[in-house]
Image (tube, rainbow, N blue to C red):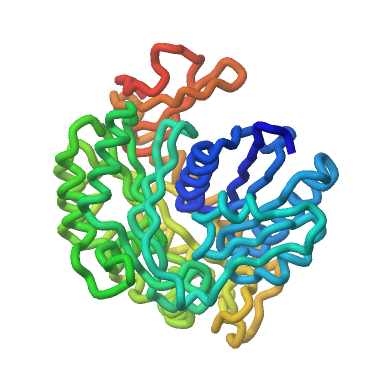
Amino acid sequence: MSQKRSVAFHTLGCKLNFSETSTLSRMMEQEGFEKRDFDGLADVYVINTCSVTDNADKECRQLVRRIQRRSPESFVVITGCYAQLKPKEIAEIPGVDLVLGAAEKFNIAQHIRELSKGDPARICSCDIDEVSGFHASFSQNDRTRTFLKVQDGCDYNCSFCTIPMARGKSRSDSIENVLKHARKLASDGVKEIVLTGVNLGDFGKGPEGNKHQEDFFGLIQELDKVEGIERYRISSIEPNLLTNDIIAFVANSDKFMPHFHIPLQSGSNEILGLMRRRYKRELYAERVKLIKTLMPHCAIGVDVIVGFPGETDAHFKETFDFLHSLDISYLHVFTYSERDHTKALEIKPVIPVHTRNERNKTLRNLSYMKMQYFTEQHNGQTRKVLFEAFEKNGMMEGYTDNYIRITTPYRQEWANEIVEWRM
């Protein structure tokens, strides 16, 4: 290795992973490492993995092969959800030197110091039931919006999901600590914070995952008082945990943006039951109706899974018709993929992959139409846009308060600034 060791990071998956990667990067820089671009040369490459879909697993393997071709003498470290779920499988990938599970990822610098190139891949992991404690994380210097992790883990048992097996039981930071991080970010010039977690609405369980000591409604009430932060977004919240009080508070807040992302997964109550979701479509429709009653301009994003085992054409039509009827803004569509050790593997019949892909395309087309309609409703209005500092081909991007993306020729004075924008 060179005297000044270098490290490069790549993140797969969710906003929570981005916040954790950013924190790991800062930790490594404090340990004397120089941060490099992942597409360049570095002494150590760290891949923070996801395991929500089969594609995320494949992408991890592809990245390792790319590193091997480019820089075979470099160390390759794999962490994240895939690393916790299948450490032995990852350790067998040629070129991998270190696999860090959920309990060890934040001890990354210590583990890297102990590595020797050419040794068999080391696995530093434990049973997920032994994972406790909460590690605060936030992204910084990566993008205008900062992702602030306030909760981790999940106590739900959705039949398709591996996240509880990868991240452990639900546990949270304290409101006091979250406020400290928010004030620090405000002093660093951050304008917008996105609150992130695995099951964000379950915020309030202590670091050991014990009973609720605080709650999400209390958190947002306190964050609203922090000076210097101009915008907050709630990244994703389960419909059964999105209370009327939370919706009403956001509607009356100048800082919490009129934007919710609410997982649905299916518009069929029968499929929701097979998925072990904790609500029915009627409750979901009630939440959307209240949001749009209090905030007609509010953006609502929806997660949907297509091709779940047992999903007939009739079930899919139920989902399509239900989504079509809702006053929502966009969809995140996921094609179901089999995950080891999940209850969904026991459900029949299995839906052919080509059918899953067709359904995905159908809903992505619906999402496009929904977003077009939502955007057109705001023609002629003036909305506040926070522009990002990143320049690409002479252009810059930003988002309105209600999450409509704006692209315009780059202007330095608008970077990380909120601008009145006529739609």
Q: Which sits in the foreground, 292 or 68?
A: 68
Residue 301 in the figure: left or right of residue 75? left
Q: Is residue 210 left or right of residue 249?
A: right
Number of disc labels: 0
Quarter holding the C terminus is: top left
Q: Position of residue 57 (x, y in %)?
A: 68, 61
Image quarter of residue 189: top left
Q: Foreground residue, 421 or 106? A: 106
Q: Is residue 20 above or below residue 241?
A: above
Q: Toward which corner of the image does residue 418 lie, by quadrant? A: top left
**Identity of the residue drawn at 35% across and 71% down:** 281
Point 82% across, 47% down: residue:
68
Question: Could one spot residue 325 in this view of the protein?
Answer: no
Where residue 127 appears, as percent x and y from the top left, is 53, 77
Indicate whether 83 appears above or below 276: above
Direction from residue 71 to residue 205 in the image, left or right: left
Q: Is residue 260 left or right of residue 128?
A: left
- Figure quadrant of the N terminus: top right
Residue 406 x %, y %: 44, 27
> Where 423 sits versus 222, above or below?
above
User: Could you tell me residue 351's position as x and y percent?
Assistant: 66, 76
Residue 53 visible in image: yes
- Residue placed most toward the observer, 92 or 195: 92
Q: Residue at x 40, y 12 (%)?
A: 413
The structure residue drawn at horizontal position 61% and vertical position 64%, both measured from the top left corner, is 82
- 95 relative to 392, above or below: below
